[in-house]
Amino acid sequence: MIFQVHIKLAEHKRGYHLITGIIEKKLSEISGLPESGLLNLFIQHTSAALTINENADPSVRADFETILNRIAPENLREYTHTLEGSDDMPAHIKSSLMGQSLTIPIRGGRMALGTWQGIYLCEFRNYGGSRNIVLTVLS
């Protein structure tokens, strides 16, 4: 069976935001969620991303920001896509590096994340607006 639902996240400031609880809540609302299967999460945007990483130490989020800003800095002379602001092209690069989708196993009707794993919304724009995520469960 295939189940599919959508989540519209409220606007988040630039940074890395734990959304594990939001995903868990939405999954719990699915009638007939299988005991085992796969969950695919897909963000429908080109300047934000999803990732799984450590959820206990907030310094992980700061380190992500520091390193990705070195890889894709703002105001680089070589950028030609500049009409949407100095944070736009770096956001596209960061989004491509981090990725728009995640696949997570479902075990016992829940996401089988590790103890220290959390799902992050990676917002790369200063003012990115609301974000849409498609949740697809395959059993």
Image (cartoon, grey):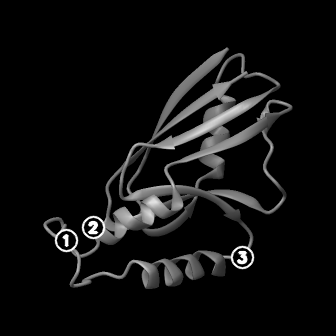
Q: Amino acid at mark 1?
A: Gly
Relative height, residue 121 to residue 44 (above, below) = below
Residue corresponding to mark 2: 88
Question: Looking at the picture, how far across and down is residue 120, in whole percent?
Answer: 58, 58
Above or below: residue 51 compared with residue 133 = below
Estimate the spatial distance between the alpha carbons at disc 2 and disc 1, rounded to whole Å: 6 Å
Of the pair 135 and 46, the residue shown nearer to us: 46
At a point 28% along the width and 68% down the height, the residue shown is 89
Q: Is residue 77 left or right of residue 134?
A: left
Q: Nearer the viewer, mark 2 or mark 3?
A: 2
Q: CA distance from mark 3 to mark 1?
A: 31 Å
Q: Residue at x 52, y 61 (%)?
A: 98
Which residue is the site of mark 3?
A: 57
Query: Dot 1 lies on which element?
Result: loop
Q: Is residue 75 left or right of residue 33?
A: left
Q: Secondary structure at mark 3?
A: loop
Q: Nearer the viewer, residue 8 or 103?
A: 103
Image location (x, y in percent) of residue 132: 42, 42
User: Which residue is denoted by mark 1 in the rendering?
Assistant: 85
Which residue is outermost to the front? 78
Give the amino acid at mark 2: Asp
Amino acid on which the number 3 mark rests in the picture: Asp
Q: Position of residue 7 (x, y in %)?
A: 48, 38
Callout 2 touching callout 1 (CB < 8 Å)? yes
Helix, strand, or loop for circle 2?
A: helix
- Do tag 2 and tag 3 residues touch (Cβ < 8 Å)? no
The span from disc 2 to disc 3 (Cα, nearest Å) is 28 Å
Quarter where residue 54 is shown? bottom right
Residue located at (64% from left, 23% from top): 30
